[in-house]
Image (spheres, grey):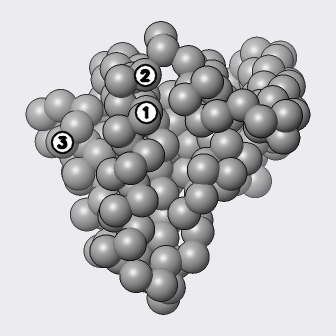
Amino acid sequence: MSESLLVHHCSPTLAGVKTGNMFSCDCKCSKELNREIRRINRKLVPKGLRVIPLKLHNGKALIYVYRPDKLAGDLNNKMACELLKQCGYSLKSSNYSVVELIRRLDVCEQFPHEIGLFLGYPPEDVNGFINDKPHNCKYTGIWKVYGDVESAKKTFAKYKKCSEIYSRRWSDGCSLEQLAICV
């Protein structure tokens, strides 16, 4: 897993404007992946970020980059708590919820749709996707929107602009440590 992939897929999280991002990468050796994740975490944890592998399967790894403090706040939302309870989460803590998400990714036949809560998507949109199905959404961008379309459009634009700026800064030679904002 390269730092370049992390910057490409996780700029809004690195910038502190998003709770988390996920991306997949090749994983030929889990020991090497874990070594790389530890190296990157030594740079990012002091900035309030964490990188973990969520799932390894068929030579691929699903990587989660997130801000634990921001996730704790997101998961304390009343609707988010209700959705997680419906999905079988115990709600002991946000860290424990991440562990439960990893377990669900391993045992569920379908991708667990509550994953949007771990990415900072609005709970009403995650609820809409789970309960109303994807056909009834009002707008589609980074996620399917069932609630406030104008707010979502502004958020999508902010994430896009952030990714463009970070891509340019990375190309200009900024390091991962320089791009990761401490919030």
Residue 105 in sight here: no
Tag 2's secondary structure? helix
Q: Which residue is mark 3?
A: 96
Instruction: Give the residue displayed 48% in from the left and 43% down from the top.
Output: 65
Q: How many C-alpha atoms fall within 10 Å of the one at disc 1: few (<14), some, or many (≥20)?
A: many
| Image side of residue 91 versus residue 173, left or right | left
In the image, residue 42 sits, relative to residue 149, either above or below, namely below
Query: Sequence order check: which comes first, mark 2 or mark 3?
Result: 2
Q: Quadrant of the N terminus?
A: bottom right
Local SS, label 3: helix
Residue at image coords 55%, 29%: 177
Residue 42 versus residue 115 in the image, above or below: above
Residue beneath label 1, please? Answer: 44
Q: Position of residue 54 (x, y in %)?
A: 38, 60
Q: Which residue is mark 2?
A: 47
Within 10 angstroms of label 3, few (less than 14), some, or many (20 or more) residues?
A: few
The secondary element bearing badge 1 is classed as helix
Cα separation between marks 2 and 3: 21 Å
Tell me where residue 57 sits by quadrant.
Answer: bottom left
Residue furthest to the bottom: 58
> Who comes first in sequence, dot 3 or dot 1?
1
Numbered label attached to residue 140: none
- Residue 56, percent across and down? 40, 75
Q: Above or below — where is 160 with respect to 51?
A: above
